[in-house]
Image (cartoon, grey):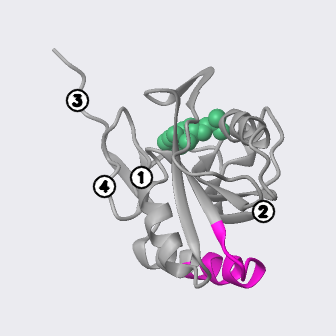
Amino acid sequence: MQNPPLQVKSVLIDEKAIQRRVEELGAEISEQYPEGVVLVGILKGAIYFLADLSRAIKSPVEMDFVVASSYRGTESSGAVTLSTDLSGKIADHHVIIVEDIVDTGRTVSALIASLQDKDPRSIGVCTLIDKPDRRIVPVPIDYCGFTIPDKFVVGYGLDYDQAYRNLPYIAVIA
Ligand code: IMP
Protein backbone atom coordinates (compact mmCIF):
# COMPACT_ATOMS: atom_id res chain seq x y z
CA MET A 1 0.00 0.00 0.00
CA GLN A 2 1.17 3.54 -0.77
CA ASN A 3 2.06 5.94 2.01
CA PRO A 4 -0.73 8.43 2.76
CA PRO A 5 -0.10 11.90 1.27
CA LEU A 6 1.70 14.33 3.56
CA GLN A 7 -0.69 16.71 5.21
CA VAL A 8 -0.42 20.38 6.02
CA LYS A 9 0.62 20.60 9.67
CA SER A 10 0.47 24.34 10.29
CA VAL A 11 0.28 27.62 8.41
CA LEU A 12 3.58 29.44 8.82
CA ILE A 13 2.84 32.60 6.77
CA ASP A 14 -0.75 33.47 5.94
CA GLU A 15 -2.12 34.99 2.76
CA LYS A 16 -2.46 38.52 4.14
CA ALA A 17 1.12 38.57 5.44
CA ILE A 18 2.39 37.41 2.04
CA GLN A 19 0.41 40.11 0.23
CA ARG A 20 1.63 42.85 2.59
CA ARG A 21 5.26 41.81 2.25
CA VAL A 22 5.06 41.50 -1.55
CA GLU A 23 3.67 45.05 -1.72
CA GLU A 24 6.58 46.29 0.43
CA LEU A 25 9.15 44.52 -1.74
CA GLY A 26 7.51 45.93 -4.88
CA ALA A 27 7.67 49.45 -3.44
CA GLU A 28 11.37 49.05 -2.55
CA ILE A 29 12.24 47.74 -6.01
CA SER A 30 10.22 50.51 -7.72
CA GLU A 31 12.13 53.12 -5.75
CA GLN A 32 15.54 51.60 -6.42
CA TYR A 33 14.96 50.93 -10.13
CA PRO A 34 12.88 53.85 -11.49
CA GLU A 35 14.29 53.12 -14.97
CA GLY A 36 12.90 49.59 -14.87
CA VAL A 37 14.06 46.06 -14.29
CA VAL A 38 14.01 42.60 -15.84
CA LEU A 39 12.64 40.00 -13.44
CA VAL A 40 14.06 36.53 -14.08
CA GLY A 41 11.82 34.00 -12.35
CA ILE A 42 12.96 30.51 -11.45
CA LEU A 43 10.26 28.00 -12.44
CA LYS A 44 8.20 26.53 -11.20
CA GLY A 45 8.28 27.71 -7.61
CA ALA A 46 8.43 31.46 -8.29
CA ILE A 47 5.30 31.67 -10.45
CA TYR A 48 2.90 33.20 -7.94
CA PHE A 49 5.56 35.34 -6.29
CA LEU A 50 6.71 36.78 -9.62
CA ALA A 51 3.13 37.36 -10.78
CA ASP A 52 2.28 39.31 -7.61
CA LEU A 53 5.65 41.06 -7.24
CA SER A 54 5.65 42.30 -10.83
CA ARG A 55 2.24 43.91 -10.27
CA ALA A 56 3.50 45.58 -7.09
CA ILE A 57 6.39 47.21 -9.01
CA LYS A 58 5.47 50.61 -10.40
CA SER A 59 8.49 51.10 -12.69
CA PRO A 60 8.72 49.32 -16.09
CA VAL A 61 9.04 45.54 -15.78
CA GLU A 62 10.09 42.91 -18.27
CA MET A 63 10.05 39.26 -17.30
CA ASP A 64 11.81 36.12 -18.28
CA PHE A 65 12.06 32.61 -16.85
CA VAL A 66 14.55 29.85 -16.29
CA VAL A 67 13.79 26.30 -15.22
CA ALA A 68 15.70 24.78 -12.31
CA SER A 69 15.37 21.49 -10.56
CA SER A 70 17.29 19.78 -7.78
CA TYR A 71 14.65 18.48 -5.39
CA ARG A 72 13.08 15.05 -5.00
CA GLY A 73 10.50 15.02 -2.21
CA THR A 74 11.97 17.01 0.66
CA GLU A 75 15.60 16.25 -0.21
CA SER A 76 17.83 18.20 -2.55
CA SER A 77 19.71 15.94 -4.96
CA GLY A 78 22.64 18.35 -4.74
CA ALA A 79 23.00 18.73 -8.50
CA VAL A 80 21.23 21.74 -9.96
CA THR A 81 19.86 21.45 -13.49
CA LEU A 82 19.34 24.88 -15.04
CA SER A 83 17.91 25.75 -18.40
CA THR A 84 18.79 29.36 -18.88
CA ASP A 85 17.68 30.14 -22.42
CA LEU A 86 16.14 33.54 -21.90
CA SER A 87 13.66 34.74 -24.49
CA GLY A 88 14.71 38.39 -24.12
CA LYS A 89 18.05 40.18 -23.89
CA ILE A 90 19.40 41.27 -20.52
CA ALA A 91 22.61 42.98 -21.68
CA ASP A 92 22.77 46.48 -20.14
CA HIS A 93 19.59 45.87 -18.16
CA HIS A 94 19.13 45.68 -14.41
CA VAL A 95 18.15 42.10 -13.61
CA ILE A 96 16.51 40.76 -10.47
CA ILE A 97 16.41 37.01 -9.99
CA VAL A 98 13.08 36.06 -8.41
CA GLU A 99 13.18 32.86 -6.35
CA ASP A 100 10.66 31.15 -4.08
CA ILE A 101 13.15 30.01 -1.45
CA VAL A 102 16.91 30.10 -1.01
CA ASP A 103 17.97 26.92 0.77
CA THR A 104 21.49 25.61 0.10
CA GLY A 105 22.07 28.56 -2.24
CA ARG A 106 23.17 26.32 -5.11
CA THR A 107 20.39 27.29 -7.54
CA VAL A 108 20.71 31.06 -7.22
CA SER A 109 24.48 30.90 -7.23
CA ALA A 110 24.48 28.82 -10.45
CA LEU A 111 22.00 31.20 -12.06
CA ILE A 112 24.02 34.30 -11.12
CA ALA A 113 27.10 32.74 -12.73
CA SER A 114 25.25 31.94 -15.93
CA LEU A 115 23.53 35.35 -16.19
CA GLN A 116 26.83 37.15 -15.67
CA ASP A 117 27.92 35.88 -19.10
CA LYS A 118 25.07 37.83 -20.67
CA ASP A 119 26.45 41.22 -19.54
CA PRO A 120 23.57 42.63 -17.49
CA ARG A 121 24.02 46.09 -15.95
CA SER A 122 23.43 44.57 -12.51
CA ILE A 123 22.09 41.37 -10.96
CA GLY A 124 20.02 41.44 -7.78
CA VAL A 125 18.34 38.60 -5.91
CA CYS A 126 14.82 38.70 -4.53
CA THR A 127 13.56 35.66 -2.64
CA LEU A 128 10.23 35.21 -0.94
CA ILE A 129 11.79 32.98 1.71
CA ASP A 130 15.29 32.54 3.06
CA LYS A 131 16.31 29.42 5.01
CA PRO A 132 19.80 30.53 6.12
CA ASP A 133 20.43 27.51 8.39
CA ARG A 134 20.72 25.30 5.31
CA ARG A 135 23.14 27.47 3.34
CA ILE A 136 26.08 25.71 1.70
CA VAL A 137 26.94 28.25 -1.01
CA PRO A 138 26.83 31.92 0.09
CA VAL A 139 24.51 34.08 -2.03
CA PRO A 140 23.90 37.82 -1.86
CA ILE A 141 20.19 38.37 -1.14
CA ASP A 142 19.04 41.93 -1.87
CA TYR A 143 15.34 41.51 -1.13
CA CYS A 144 13.91 38.89 1.21
CA GLY A 145 10.27 38.38 2.11
CA PHE A 146 10.62 36.14 5.14
CA THR A 147 13.41 34.32 6.96
CA ILE A 148 12.36 30.94 8.33
CA PRO A 149 13.96 28.16 10.37
CA ASP A 150 14.97 24.84 8.81
CA LYS A 151 11.52 23.47 7.99
CA PHE A 152 10.20 22.07 4.71
CA VAL A 153 7.43 24.36 3.52
CA VAL A 154 4.84 24.26 0.75
CA GLY A 155 2.34 26.62 -0.84
CA TYR A 156 2.36 29.88 -2.85
CA GLY A 157 4.38 28.09 -5.54
CA LEU A 158 6.44 25.80 -3.31
CA ASP A 159 5.81 22.10 -3.80
CA TYR A 160 6.31 18.70 -2.29
CA ASP A 161 6.72 16.37 -5.30
CA GLN A 162 4.72 18.85 -7.43
CA ALA A 163 1.78 18.99 -4.98
CA TYR A 164 0.58 21.87 -2.76
CA ARG A 165 1.84 24.69 -5.03
CA ASN A 166 -1.60 26.29 -5.23
CA LEU A 167 -2.09 26.78 -1.50
CA PRO A 168 -2.48 30.54 -1.01
CA TYR A 169 -0.35 30.46 2.17
CA ILE A 170 3.00 28.98 3.23
CA ALA A 171 2.60 25.87 5.36
CA VAL A 172 4.71 23.29 7.09
CA ILE A 173 3.93 19.69 6.18
CA ALA A 174 3.88 16.81 8.64
P1 IMP B 1 18.78 25.61 -3.22
O1 IMP B 1 19.45 25.48 -4.55
O2 IMP B 1 19.18 24.50 -2.27
O3 IMP B 1 18.89 26.98 -2.60
O4 IMP B 1 17.28 25.26 -3.44
C1 IMP B 1 16.38 26.07 -3.98
C2 IMP B 1 15.21 25.26 -4.46
O5 IMP B 1 14.94 24.12 -3.63
C3 IMP B 1 13.97 26.10 -4.37
O6 IMP B 1 13.77 26.80 -5.57
C4 IMP B 1 12.90 25.08 -4.14
O7 IMP B 1 12.42 24.60 -5.36
C5 IMP B 1 13.57 23.94 -3.41
N1 IMP B 1 13.30 24.02 -1.95
C6 IMP B 1 14.17 24.28 -0.96
N2 IMP B 1 13.57 24.27 0.25
C7 IMP B 1 12.28 23.98 0.00
C8 IMP B 1 11.12 23.86 0.84
O8 IMP B 1 11.15 24.01 2.08
N3 IMP B 1 9.97 23.57 0.20
C9 IMP B 1 9.86 23.40 -1.15
N4 IMP B 1 10.91 23.52 -1.96
C10 IMP B 1 12.11 23.81 -1.40
Instruction: Give whichever of discs 3 and 4 has the lower sequence position.
Output: 3
Q: Residue at x 74, y 77 (%)?
A: 33
Q: Residue at x 52, y 71 (%)?
A: 53
Q: Which of 17 and 119 is in front in this view?
A: 119
Cα–Cα span, label 3 and label 1: 22 Å
Classify 10 Å Cα crowding around label 1: few (below 14), some (14-19), many (20 and above).
many
Ligand 1, by image quadrant, is top right
Q: Name the residue under label 1.
A: 157
- Mark 4 C-beta to ligand 1 under 8 Å: no
Cα–Cα span, label 3 and label 4: 20 Å
Q: Mark 4 points at which residue?
A: 166
The amino acid on which the numbered mark 3 sits, given as a three-letter code, is Pro
For mark 3, give the secondary structure.
loop
Q: Mark 2 points at which residue?
A: 142
Answer whether labels 1 and 2 touch (C-beta < 8 Å). no
Classify 10 Å Cα crowding around label 3: few (below 14), some (14-19), many (20 and above).
few
For mark 1, give the secondary structure.
loop
The amino acid on which the numbered mark 2 sits, given as a three-letter code, is Asp
**Magenta-colored span:** 23-37
Q: Name the residue under label 3.
A: 4
Instruction: Give whichever of discs 3 and 1 has the lower sequence position.
Output: 3
Which label lies toward us, 2 or 3? 2
